[in-house]
Image (spheres, rainbow, N blue to C red):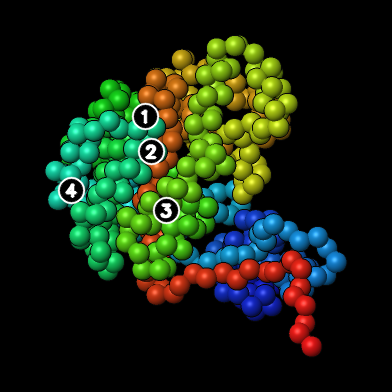
Amino acid sequence: MLISAQEAARRLGVKPATLYAYVSRELLRSAPGPDSRSRRYYAEDVERLKRSRHAGPRSGKPPKPFDSLTPVLDTTISLIENGRLFYRGSDVVKLAETADLETIAQVLWEQADPENFRVGQMQAQLRRLLVGRHLPLMAMDRARMILSELTMHDVAALDTSPLAVRRTGGRLAAVLAGSVTRTMPSGLAIHEELRRVWKLDASGGDLVRRCLVLIADHELNASTYVGRCIASTGATPYAVVLGALGALSGPKHGGETGRVEAFLREVLRSGDVERAVAECLQRGERIPGFGQPLYPDGDPRGRDIIDAIRRSRYARTSVRLIEIGERVSDLIGRHPNVDFALGLVSIALKLPPGSGLGMFLIGRSVGWIAHALEQYATGALIRPRARYVGVLPIAVQ
């Protein structure tokens, strides 16, 4: 039996906007409603989910290390549904045809001035950091070091009103671009700045633009959740982005992009896809860049980037890379995701090692600021509760 979103939300005790999170995690099934904009939900799924949420911690089943039902936060920023990603109701794949990162900031921040994407009053401090000392080799480490220094000088970032946060967010995105390229930003649009430093032609610059747009937000992933927790304390956007960068650096999150680059370079060197896959699996490692639980039929972001490469002037030189992805997919039964696509672009365009993750952290910073804005507006502190499953205390007689 199908029930309306309102009825499903009532039975679960959540807001209707929360239902999509359950659908994206395959905890609920949905079906088209009577009109093109509504969805209906299977009553048996709702009741099963309701029972699992209210089950006692000592029901006889072994405890789970993480409950996928929580935490769930309401958001108006992005939606993952039916194998597609939307930014405020707009399909991200369609946006990626023409939009740049600054335009996406206008969408996700609901208001943004392209002039905000300048280093501004941080110019002297950033130049000193870029030229005055030995910088870490990895883009992620450079970004974290530089932001940690700048946060002590950017007094305007202490203002967490919406207009001020948008201005700070623009500065942060520009600073991150400079951190990735080790070059002072020149005031160009961010993808044009990367194109200039990486010496790309128009086709290469357009691929970079597309990557930045497609990676800008992805609902409540690990780094975004960390950022929202930090924002909920009232900390500055610098603290939000620094905390999110810490989460992004892990090998199970943004670090996977770097692992894709290493995997592809190894396969190109050896020429043996099967052997590379077998060795990786024998070490107990997953193949980086394949599979995305929210997209069982394939990550639309990764697919769109790969299709764009096929249409670009890099198509001929990327044939082998694309074939590697297809062969690995056949071997392990999982589709290439956006991490694979970013790694592929980095190698196909002959960018400096680690540039895939560099594009990731620049683009995703726009999403982190969007979530910070949304969290600041709630005024609420995020404080999940733990479900204790350890030894019970001895009752005092």
Q: Is residue 263 visible?
A: yes
CB-based contact (under 8 Å), mark 2 and mark 1:
yes
Residue of label 1: 137
Q: Is residue 172 above or below residue 254?
A: below
- Measured in 3D between alpha carbons, the distance from the residue under mark 2 to the one under mark 1, in whole angstroms, is 7 Å
* Quarter residue 14 falls in: bottom right
Query: What residue type is disc 2 on?
Result: Asp
Disc 2 residue crowd, few under 14, some 14–19, many 20+, Cα 10 Å: some
Expressed as whole percent of the image width and height from the top left, the position of residue 194 reads 29, 32
Task: Please tell me whether mark 1 sits on a helix, a strand or a loop.
Answer: loop
Tell me which residue sits at (17%, 38%) in the image: 127
Residue of label 4: 122
Query: What residue type is disc 3 on?
Result: Gly
Nearer-N-terminus badge (2/4): 4
Tell me which residue sits at (60%, 11%) in the image: 271
Expressed as whole percent of the image width and height from the top left, the position of residue 145 reads 33, 43
Query: What residue type is disc 1 on?
Result: Leu
Q: In which quadrant is the N terminus drawn?
A: bottom right
Nearer-N-terminus badge (4/3): 4
Residue of label 3: 243
Q: How many marks?
A: 4
Q: Is residue 90 visible?
A: no
CB-based contact (under 8 Å), mark 3 and mark 2:
no
Tell me which residue sits at (66%, 44%) in the image: 296
